[in-house]
Image: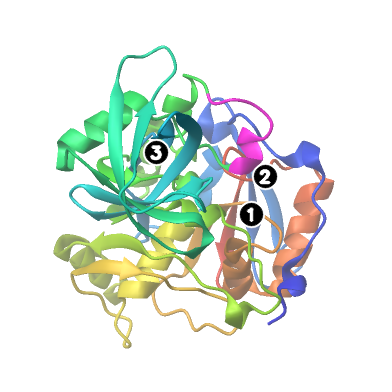
Amino acid sequence: MRVDDFHFELPAERIAIRPAEPRESAQLLVVKVSGSDYLIDSHVGDLPSFLRNGDCLIVNNTRVLPARLTGTRQRGEAVAGIEATLHKREDANQWWAFVRPAKKLLVGETIQFRRNHSDAELVAEVAAKREGGEILLRFASEGSKLDEAIRSVGVMPLPPYIAAKRAEDAKDEQDYQTMFADRTGAVAAPTAGLHFTPDLLHKVHSLGVVTTQVTLHVGAGTFLPVKVDDTDDHHMHAEWGEVSAATADILNATKRRGGRIIAVGTTSLRLLESSVNEDGTFKAWAGDTAIFITPGYRFKAVDVLLTNFHLPRSTLFMLVSAFSGLDTMGKAYKHAIDTGYRFYSYGDACLLHRSA
């Protein structure tokens, strides 16, 4: 399909730079695929009224690392500033990162990362280079020690559409982390999960709705613009994910009893659609996924999707258009823009029903 098919005009004032407080007070647009009331204005706190006994809600339990690093590269007496955003862990002591400027960096050179007003330092060697500013950084420490070192020098990697409007601050360390965050490895938040609070989750459970967790370590590639004219030419960056055997059992039991699989966020949906069998059943699964979902995709796993409002021409808007229909989503987004919904990571949410 033409990428232009997924364009829409979004006024700058619709971009949220802080989340709603409390989190469940965010607006919720319920989008059905038929009927005269196919668009319903509500709030996230009312989510339980749109769920059913026997449904299963799947959340992503990834935890965001403060993965934006600032440092220097020294060559003789010449010192150059370096900015790096980690996006995918390669192994215990290596990360792929988007680096600026990357073109002049040489394999084997050393970068020293520091945080303002801190004595903490993190040293990395340039281990390999790819096109598009991707650099493989090899660190001296590994595993949990490396995670701790990154936390000491890095800052939260706010999406570019927020970072362009204000600097990251201490509040983002809490705001840009979901209540489910447990397994460290993401460099971007699974933002649909940001709307949940313990009180909202208790109300969901009281209906007889089951919740379970998956892990998809969201990479910075989720923010990369689509630079091609045709979706067939777009390259997705891989992200690591896991569906446990216990979660697979819960999902299979939900399907057997006729419950709906409700993904909280496009990250959960992409992982479930990557791991589901052709017959719609699940088993334990772990690995990389680079699934790219556009209209025409046949969904096998997910029935309902809770997600935020996404960028024009983005892979995520393509995904929701595949899920509920491009025409339906075009009308839903126009309604959201016209009636004051807030967009993107800190914005409002929509509850999408799958198109036949």
Q: CA distance from mark 2 to mark 3?
A: 23 Å
* Residue 219 seen in render: yes
Residue 61, given in percent of the width and then of the height, sits at 31, 47
Local packing at callout 1 (Cα closer than 10 Å; few below 14, some 14-19, many 20+) is some
Lateral position of residue 62 relative to residue 51, left or right: left
Residue 11, given in percent of the width and then of the height, sits at 82, 45
Lateral position of residue 192 relative to residue 208, left or right: right
Residue 246, given in percent of the width and then of the height, sits at 16, 61
Q: Is residue 1 magenta?
A: no
Q: CA distance from mark 1 to mark 2?
A: 7 Å
State which region is magenta.
160-168
The reply to whether callout 1 and callout 2 are in contact (CB within 8 Å) is yes
Residue 27, given in percent of the width and then of the height, sits at 64, 40
Q: Residue 319 falls in which quadrant of the image?
A: bottom right
Secondary structure of the residue carrying tag 3 is: loop
Q: In the image, which disc is placed on residue 343? A: 2
Q: Quadrant of the C terminus?
A: bottom right
Q: CA distance from mark 1 to mark 3?
A: 22 Å
Mark 3, residue position: 67
Local packing at callout 3 (Cα closer than 10 Å; few below 14, some 14-19, many 20+) is many
Mark 1, residue position: 310
Q: Which comes before the other along the chain, label 1 or label 3? A: 3
Q: How many marks?
A: 3
Q: Which comes before the other along the chain, label 2 or label 3? A: 3
At 77% from the left and 72% from the top, the residue drawn is 4
* Residue 259 seen in render: no
Secondary structure of the residue carrying tag 2 is: loop
